Every structure is written in C-alpha cells, then in structure tokens.
Amino acid sequence: MTGKKIIEEEIDYSTFDGTEVKALIARPSDEKKHPAIIVVQEIWGLTNFLKSVASRLAEEGFVAMAPHLYSRKDHIDLYTEENIMDAMRPMWSLPPEKRRDQNAIKELLAKSSDTSKRIINDLMFNRQTFEETMAKDLVEGHKFLKNRPYTNGKMGVVGFCMGGGLSFQVSTMVPFDATVVYYGANPKNLDDISKLKGPVFGIYAGEDGPINAGLPELIPAILKHKKSFEMKIYPNTQHAFFNHTGLAYDEKAAKDVWPLTVKFFSHNLGD
C-alpha cells in the first residue's frame, strides 16, 4: 500500500466558538473512500514535521488531517514555532529540579519579552485551560473529517508530545476506532478511560521521566475498565524521539515504530 499518489489541501473547519480552524488534509488521489486519521500537533504547532506525518499516512492509504490548534486570531501570529522556541528555551535550560521552583521561574520571566511571558503563562501555567480548548477543537475536527465524502466512517487519531496527551484525552470524548499516543500524558481523569471505543497504542521514550511517571497509574485503569492497550517503550531514547527535525531524534527507534503504527491503524481501521 505504501507509495499511493496523494492530494494535499489546506482547509478550514468551524469549531465550537465560531473559530475557523486551519488544517492540512492529505489523502489518496483515487476515488475510493478511506479511513481517516487526525494528526495532533506537538507544542510547536502545525510544523513541517506534522505535515510530513499526514503525508506519510496518506501514502499508506489513509485520509489524514492535521489541524492547526493555534488558529485563533490572537494566537496564530503569536504562537509561531520560532516564538515558542524563544520562550521555552530559557525554561528548558533550567535544571529539571528548578523547573517547578516558583522563584527560579519568576527570575526567568522577569528577563523575558512580553511575547515570551504570554507564551510561558499559557503553555505552562494555564496549560489545562489551553488544552481544554484544543480538545474541543479536535472534537469538532472529528465531526468534520468523518463527514467528508472521501472517508468511510472509520476514525483514528495520533498525537505527539502535547498532541499525544490530547489524542488520548479526545479519545475519551468522541468515539475513535484506534488511538496512537506518542509519549503523551494520560487522560486528565483516568476513569474516563471507560469511554474509549477503540484500542490504544502507547509509544514511550525510555528517558522521559515526566511522561513515564504516569504509567504506573495508567495500567491499572486500563485493566479496571477492560480496554485494549498495547505499549512499546524505546530504551535510551528521549521525549520527541520520532521528530526527525528535532534534537531528540533517534533514527533507529523512529524507523522501528513507524511500521508498527501503520500496522496498528491498518488492523483497527480495516484498510
């Protein structure tokens, strides 16, 4: 199936508050109906990396939609990849034990630009509220994509980093037939796992303490609610190891996990 000719188009879809969410759709160029997959962004937004994932899924025979979750008028020019990098780089330069130290963070913010201050406040201190809005945008994206004439009704979702957590969360809000979580956080309320429709494939980096700290709570919740869950941990890899444009990229792990991802979706979405 690999290597299908594809069509790529930029579209907008309306979300819950009237915002037009920008998105890339990549799909096979034939006239058949195909299963659909939503591709959920990292913290950086709708980057070339995310677009490449959508294109690769389309080449495998899926309709892939990658929404730009910073589409709102007061976000789209502020939350650029460059601005986010400038804001977060000093934060990540702090030793891990200092990243929750309010005094250290206040010192850092005092030296930051107004743009960086707003980004840090939204993405770190107001993260839950920010992600609740994103999750609602993904729910509307699910409705939009499922009703396209070139989709067959089967729906999957895959997310990376922040988007990994969002993909897990939104799967407890609307019925996805398959969910892939690349080093993402657990759903906010673990009992919401009872609402999962399809199986979940969790992919984790061995050296990713903050995310992996949630696994001891996740597994009992999966067992409690009798859900299908597969997990793959890649030892000696860092958070974001799949992103070939980032510093944490691990070629061996990335090349191993991609066919597993495609196989998981093909099996559970029936294409």
Image (cartoon, helix red, strand yellow):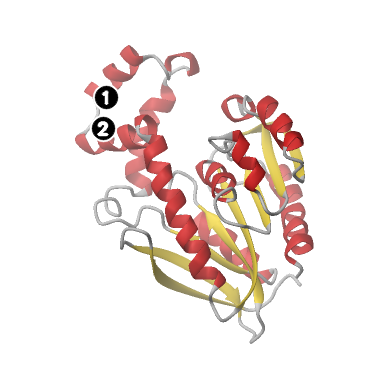
Asked which quadrant contains residue 124, the reply is: top left
Q: Which residue is drawn at 72% across and 54% down?
A: 261
Task: Name the residue tied to disc 1.
Answer: 109
Q: How many neighbours does mark 1 have within 10 angstroms: few (below 14), some (14-19), or many (20 or more)?
A: some
Q: Residue at x 52, y 56 (%)?
A: 50
Does residue 160 lie above or below 61 as drawn? above
* Label drawn at residue 117: 2
Q: Which of 122 and 258 is in front in this view?
A: 122
- Compute the Cα span from label 1 to label 2: 6 Å
Q: Residue at x 26, y 36 (%)?
A: 118
Residue 37: percent from left, percent from top: 61, 63
Along the horizontal axis of the image, is 178 left or right of 69? right
Asked which quadrant contains residue 17, the reply is: bottom left
Does residue 77 lie above or below 155 as drawn? above
Along the horizontal axis of the image, is 180 left or right of 128? right
Q: Which of 49 and 180 is in front in this view?
A: 180
Report if the CB atoms under discs 1 and 2 are less than 8 Å apart. Answer: yes
Residue 3: percent from left, percent from top: 70, 73
Q: How many neighbours does mark 2 have within 10 angstroms: few (below 14), some (14-19), or many (20 or more)?
A: some
Q: Residue at x 47, y 67 (%)?
A: 24
Among the two numbered marks 1 and 2 on one chain, the one whose residue lies closer to the N terminus: 1
Residue 249 shows in this picture:
no
Q: Tag 1: residue type?
A: Leu
Residue 173: percent from left, percent from top: 54, 51
Q: Tag 2: residue type?
A: Lys
Along the horizontal axis of the image, is 23 left or right of 231? left
